Image: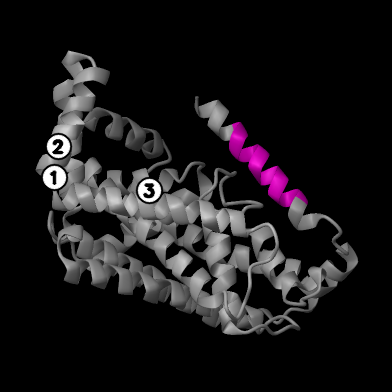
């Protein structure tokens, strides 16, 4: 099963890489990369880590119903998780950071994973908000409307389900119990029911409209901050588009990276970004150079810092496998 998922990710990355590189003027691309003013990456990386700190605060806020973990202890866990997403397929870093959090703070993996799923849900909703806010001023390139429509349906259905789980846990528990009683062997049913209870515990932030609004606003701030990194990196290259276009690029790129792909989102990050920029008149060689450098600037710093934190926290590469096993044991 893992092999099948891996090769599916490889196939999707190859398709998106083909779309990214098709018709590229490689001489113009290399000239663009060589002449870029890379000093602009420094403020870009700095503002990106401000967004990572904001992500840490958001996770701290969502976990406080279970345990209030200080930001200084939570930040390394978040960075390790994002590093794991960058080097392992299928966003394995999300499971890894929940595993590390349990090892350090005693929070059950299934509870923290529920909050991680909520994070991804709110991130997706903000990406869709960016798309719909910018559409009157920055229309989508051909071919990406279907992708946005698909994710709109998925994220809004997920939001409705999670709200129902958080607000009416007793009613949803009866539905869940009915399904489990018919689909799961009797000996495993107590463990499966326990998984449901712990997962719902991680959704407690959804019970309060105030908390719901605060999580959504913090998610919006996070992604506006990350879009600012796109703006800083753009200053290194000989083109200019409006901040609204960069918001649209941020949204479409990050929606596309939820698709299966190789580690580091090869292709799924690049092809949509290039398509957005070329749709607004940026030559493909320049758009490709910018998108590649931006991709590396997003990938490398947090991956390097995550590796440092792994050493400091005494987390080894084998802990990726242990994290998956830990999740299985809790179910």
Q: Secondary structure at mark 1?
A: helix
Chief secondary structure of the magenta portion: helix
Q: Image height check: is 49 above or below 299?
A: below
Q: Secondary structure at mark 3?
A: helix
The quarter of the picture where residue 25 lies is bottom right
Q: Secondary structure at mark 2?
A: helix
Q: Which residue is mark 1?
A: 169
Image position, residue 170 (x, y; %): 10, 41
Question: How many labels, in total?
Answer: 3
Residue 94 is tagged as 3
Which quadrant, please, contains the C terminus? top left
Q: Is residue 144 magenta?
A: no
Mark 3 or 1: the one toward you: 1
Image position, residue 136 (x, y; %): 57, 78
Q: Which residue is mark 2?
A: 173
Magenta region, residue range: 7-18
Which residue is pictured at 67% across the width and 83% down the height?
241
């Amino acid at each position: 099963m893992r092999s099948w998922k891996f090769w599916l990710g490889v196939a999707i990355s190859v398709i998106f890489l083909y779309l990214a590189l098709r018709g590229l003027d490689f001489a113009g691309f290399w000239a663009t990369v060589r002449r870029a003013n890379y000093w602009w990456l420094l403020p870009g990386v700095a503002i990106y880590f401000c967004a990572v700190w904001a992500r840490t605060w958001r996770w701290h806020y969502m976990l406080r119903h279970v345990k209030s973990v200080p930001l200084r202890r939570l930040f390394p866990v978040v960075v390790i998780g994002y590093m794991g997403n960058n080097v392992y397929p299928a966003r394995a870093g999300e499971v890894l950071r929940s595993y590390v959090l349990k090892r350090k703070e005693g929070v059950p993996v299934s509870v923290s994973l529920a909050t991680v799923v909520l994070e991804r849900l709110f991130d997706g909703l903000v990406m869709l908000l960016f798309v719909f806010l910018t559409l009157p001023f920055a229309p989508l390139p051909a071919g990406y409307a279907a992708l946005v429509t698909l994710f709109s349906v998925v994220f809004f259905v997920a939001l409705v389900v999670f709200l129902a789980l958080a607000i009416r846990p007793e009613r949803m528990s009866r539905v869940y119990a009915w399904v489990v009683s018919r689909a799961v062997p009797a000996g495993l049913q107590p463990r499966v029911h326990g998984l449901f209870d712990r997962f719902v515990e991680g959704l407690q932030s959804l019970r309060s409209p105030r908390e719901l609004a605060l999580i959504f606003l913090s998610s919006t701030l996070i992604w506006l901050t990350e879009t600012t990194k796109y703006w800083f990196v753009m200053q290194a290259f000989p083109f200019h588009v409006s901040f609204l276009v960069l918001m649209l690029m941020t949204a479409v790129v990050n929606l596309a990276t939820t698709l299966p792909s190789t580690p580091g989102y090869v292709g799924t990050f690049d092809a949509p970004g290039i398509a957005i920029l070329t749709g607004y008149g940026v030559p493909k060689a320049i758009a490709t150079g910018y998108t590649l450098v931006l991709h590396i600037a997003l990938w490398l710093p947090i991956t390097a810092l995550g590796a440092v934190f792994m050493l400091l926290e005494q987390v080894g590469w084998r802990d990726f496998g242990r994290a998956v096993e830990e999740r299985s044991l809790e179910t």
